Amino acid sequence: MKNVKLKLSPGTANPRAASAARRATRQRSVYRKADVEEIFRRLSVQRPEPKGELEHVNAFTLLVAVALSAQATDAGVNKATRPLFAVADTPEKMLALGEEKLRDAIKTIGLYRNKAKNVIALSERLIADFGGAVPKTREELMTLPGVGRKTANVVLQMAFGQSTIAVDTHLFRIANRIRLAPGKTPDEVEANLMRVIPQKYLYHAHHWLILHGRYVCKARRPECERCIIADICKSPEKSCDIPAPLVELPPQVIPVAG
Ligand code: SF4
């Protein structure tokens, strides 16, 4: 998962996040409630059970995979972590492997030296402060080395079933491009998305928007002629008003991004 470069603030109790939330309420979505409901209804029909593409076998390996995915593709991370997680799927085993071998295992991933340091440091912290388990709150997760708000939100959603919105580059672009939840920072976009998305769609919304951004509403040129919400979309960049036929896509046919 590629990172938005802007730094995220630590928690909603934090003054910076609180002020982002206040600013977010001033930047309104251009959609009526019924339009937002219809957008997410269609995304839910298209992909009833969306899945993240980062491979993992437990909460710890998910945390490591997400931490490694900054500035890298999920496919690239999966290629490196498959053999890594076969030998190191707990903090204890990661420490036993050691920083040098870890560095070697992930050297195909960008920023691997720094990431190896962080993974070793976070493994130590998990053992020292959390009994070797991955904590289940955003505040605790964000005390771990290399873990920011986006990483914490992904782990809370995928490992612990919480309805969070992790704003990556795709969500940030879509929220602003189609003016669903405009914001100048990922914190503002997150606060706006949490406010406009109907509660019943919140849990999967993060993945629906990522996949929509990755495969249809692409960065360089949105493929509006393939878009199932083209008739509702109010983006100034929209090039087509006719919605593509709404067909269900089983999770296994979602291609892995290259
Ligand atoms: S119509 Fe075009 S701009 Fe709007 S969401 Fe679809 S792909 Fe993106």
Image: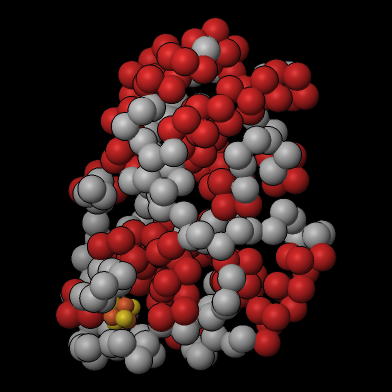
Side (left or right) of 40 relative to 258: right
Q: Quadrant of residue 216?
A: bottom left
- Residue 242 is situated, as x and y percent measured from the top left of the image, at 20, 87
- Residue 67 is situated, as x and y percent measured from the top left of the image, at 51, 39
Query: In the figure, 66 relative to 162: above or below?
Result: above
Numbered marks: total:
0
**Camera sees residue 132:** yes
Q: Name the residue at 26% across, 72% down.
A: 220
Q: Name the residue at 69% across, 58% down.
A: 9
- Residue 86 is situated, as x and y percent measured from the top left of the image, at 38, 15
Q: Name the residue at 47% across, 79% down.
A: 176
Residue closest to the eye, 255 or 71: 71
Query: In the figure, 228 relative to 78: above or below?
Result: below
Q: Quadrant of residue 127?
A: top right
**Camera sees residue 232:** no
Residue closest to the eye, 118 or 189: 118
Q: Name the residue at 54% across, 86% down.
A: 29
- Residue 215 is situated, as x and y percent measured from the top left of the image, at 25, 62
Query: In the figure, 164 relative to 161: above or below?
Result: below
User: Which colouring convention does the figure follow?
Assistant: secondary structure
